[in-house]
C-alpha cells in the first residue's frame, strides 16, 4: 500500500489535448441539434467549461455564447452546487436547441442543477466519470471515479516524482 493521496492518481491534460478533445466533442455534436441539426447557442459552465465551449462554438460556427456560473468545488473538495450567474433567460427558455458545455462531469451535481433549470438542453462534457455519466448526453473520454483530472489552467511546469519509486 502507498501513502498516495486520492488526487495523486492524476490524469494530466495539456492545452493541446483539451483542444483536440474539445474539437472531437464538436464533431460528435455536429448536425445533432433540433433545428435541422443546428444549435441555437452554446452555454459554458464556468469556469472549466469556458475553453471547451469556445472551441465547440468555433468549430460549429455558433455565434451566441453565454455562461452559467455554478460553484460546486472549493479547491479539490466538492460542495453543494450553487448558481452564481444565469444565462440570458429569453435565449434559454426550457433549453431547446442549447448546448451546455463543461470540461468534466464528476458526481453529476452541477449538471443536475442545469438539467432541472433547462430540461431540454443538451449537456455535453469533454470528460466523464461514472457517477456523472447519466447526467450528460455526450462526452468524449471516460475516466475512473477515483482519478483527479489536472487541467492545463490549473497547472504549472514543475518536477513530478515517478509513480513508483524514486529512482
Image: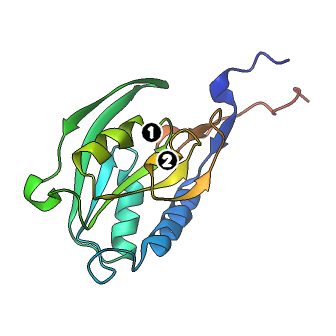
Mark 2 and mark 1 lie on one chain; the one further toward the N terminus is: 1
**Could you say where residue 100 lies in the image, as x and y percent from the top left?**
33, 56
- Counting the numbered discs, the total is 2
Looking at the image, which residue is at 39% across and 80% down?
31
Q: Residue furthest bottom?
A: 36
Circle 1 sits on which residue? 108
Compare residues 84 and 8 and report the one nearer the observer.
84
| Label 1, residues with CA under 10 Å away: few <14, some 14-19, many ≥20 | some
> What label sits on residue 134 in the rendered view?
2
* Mark 2 vs mark 1, CA separation in Å: 8 Å
Looking at the image, which residue is at 66% across and 36% down?
10
For label 2, the SS is helix
Q: Residue furthest left?
A: 90
**Could you say where residue 41 lies in the image, as x and y percent from the top left?**
24, 66
Q: Which corner quadrant of the image does residue 160 belong to?
A: top right
Looking at the image, which residue is at 87% across and 26% down?
166
For label 1, the SS is loop
Amino acid at each position: 500500500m502507498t501513502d498516495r493521496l486520492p488526487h495523486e492518481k492524476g490524469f494530466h491534460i495539456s492545452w493541446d489535448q483539451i483542444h483536440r478533445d474539445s474539437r472531437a466533442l464538436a464533431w460528435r455534436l455536429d448536425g445533432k441539434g433540433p433545428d435541422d441539426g443546428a444549435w441555437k447557442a452554446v452555454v459554458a459552465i464556468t469556469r472549466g467549461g469556458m475553453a471547451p465551449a469556445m472551441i465547440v462554438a468555433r468549430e460549429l460556427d455558433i455565434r451566441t455564447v453565454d455562461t452559467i456560473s455554478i460553484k460546486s468545488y472549493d479547491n479539490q473538495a466538492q460542495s453543494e452546487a450553487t448558481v452564481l450567474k444565469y444565462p440570458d433567460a429569453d435565449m434559454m427558455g426550457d433549453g431547446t436547441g442549447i448546448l451546455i458545455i463543461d470540461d468534466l462531469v464528476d458526481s453529476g451535481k452541477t449538471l443536475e442543477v442545469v438539467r432541472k433549470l433547462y430540461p431540454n438542453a443538451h449537456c455535453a462534457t469533454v470528460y466523464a466519470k461514472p457517477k456523472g455519466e447519466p447526467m450528460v448526453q455526450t462526452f468524449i473520454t471516460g475516466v475512473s471515479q477515483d482519478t483527479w483530472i489536472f487541467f492545463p489552467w490549473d497547472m504549472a511546469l514543475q518536477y513530478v516524482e515517478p509513480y513508483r519509486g524514486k529512482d
